[in-house]
Amino acid sequence: MNYSICIRTLGKGGEKYSRLLNSIKSLKSRPEEVIIVIPHGYSAPIEVLGYERVVYSEKGMLIQRIVGYESVKSEYVLLVDDDVEFEPDFINKLSAPIKKGLAEITFPIYQEMLPEKGIRTLIPALTLSAVPMIKKDMYTKVIASGGWSYYRVPNQYKKPIYAHSAPGTCMFARRQALIEADIRNELWVEIPSYPLWEDMVLFYKAWISGFKVMGIPDVGFEHLDAGATSFNRSVDASYASGINHIIFWYKFVFKQQKGIISNIINIAALSYWMVTSSLYKMLNGAFRGKKKELQAFIKGLNDGLTYIRN
């Protein structure tokens, strides 16, 4: 199959990156090329396949994805992070719905992306951030609050299923679909230092541009999670969850629908999310000493509202 692999990295994956390279070596369908997308000023990984090509870009989770698929010449592209591993038949399984004309973009379903069961399901649901789906006709859906609903597919589920969004860790796509979706116009997602929602922006912008996205169950895939950590990570994430949620809602929910009733519903849903999420952050600050997260979140909300007004 005519496809390439683009790896988004900072060059520090280590042993987990080696496991990704071993997965690539084991693929039944070998890629035309493997591109390593790394920010300017960073060193390429010392672990090599021997035939990869290094491409430099600005540092950013979304821009590195964009530079990756813009750099390939093949018809299809697998976009992956540097901390995953997969089975030898991985490409054949992800490409099957695309070959059948059912979708232009696919991704492996793995339950780790969904909220954990228990209280970690309840809080996102009460704030309309991530809500279990009642009508289980898709894997994920964008909802009026700017959040999303999800179907926790059972382990025995075997059929591909449509989705509005998915983890940005891995996706297989027809390259032209990504080009025509004009993802470069969404680099506002990297205003915060920790660009939450970059995956939702990537998948859903493609969806509303007319390109179908499908999740593929029963695929041998593991996210090894070699993500960097820092003292301010939770504070940065709180700011990003405020500003990027507001901008996402405005561009991809509010602006996509017309009519007074739809506008009222969307504004009411966003307002509810803002109030309940702020209340949750306030309680977290009072009882768990996370006042900086509350401050960062409120600043994010204010910056997001300023952005869409301008």
Image (cartoon, grey):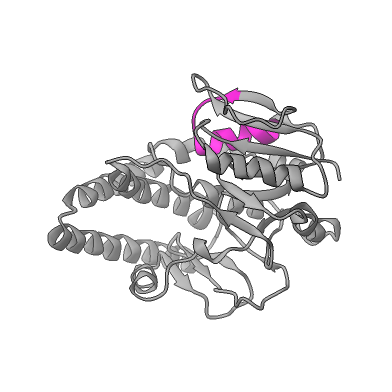
Q: Is residue 208 above or below residue 8?
A: below
Magenta stretch: dominant secondary structure: helix
Residue 290 located within the stretch drawn in magenta? no
- Residue farthest to the top, as pictured: 41
Tell me which corner region of the image, top left, top right, bottom left or bottom right, holds residue 101.
bottom right
Residue 76 vs residue 121: left or right?
right
Residue 164 on image: x %, y %: 60, 60
Residue 79 vs residue 120: left or right?
right
- Residue positioned 70% across, 32% down in the render: 49
Q: Is residue 227 above or below residue 59?
A: below
Q: Is residue 196 above or below residue 47?
A: below
- Residue positioned 52% across, 20% down in the render: 40
Rendered-image quadrant of the C terminus: top left
Q: Nearer the viewer, residue 96 or 165?
A: 96
Residue 199 vs residue 231: left or right?
right
Tell me which corner region of the image, top left, top right, bottom left or bottom right, holds residue 139.
bottom right
Residue 293 on image: x %, y %: 24, 50
Q: Which residues are magenta?
A: 56-70
Residue 1 on image: x %, y %: 86, 45
Residue 168 on image: x %, y %: 56, 49
- Residue positioned 43% across, 63% down in the render: 145
Q: Nearer the viewer, residue 90 or 254?
A: 90
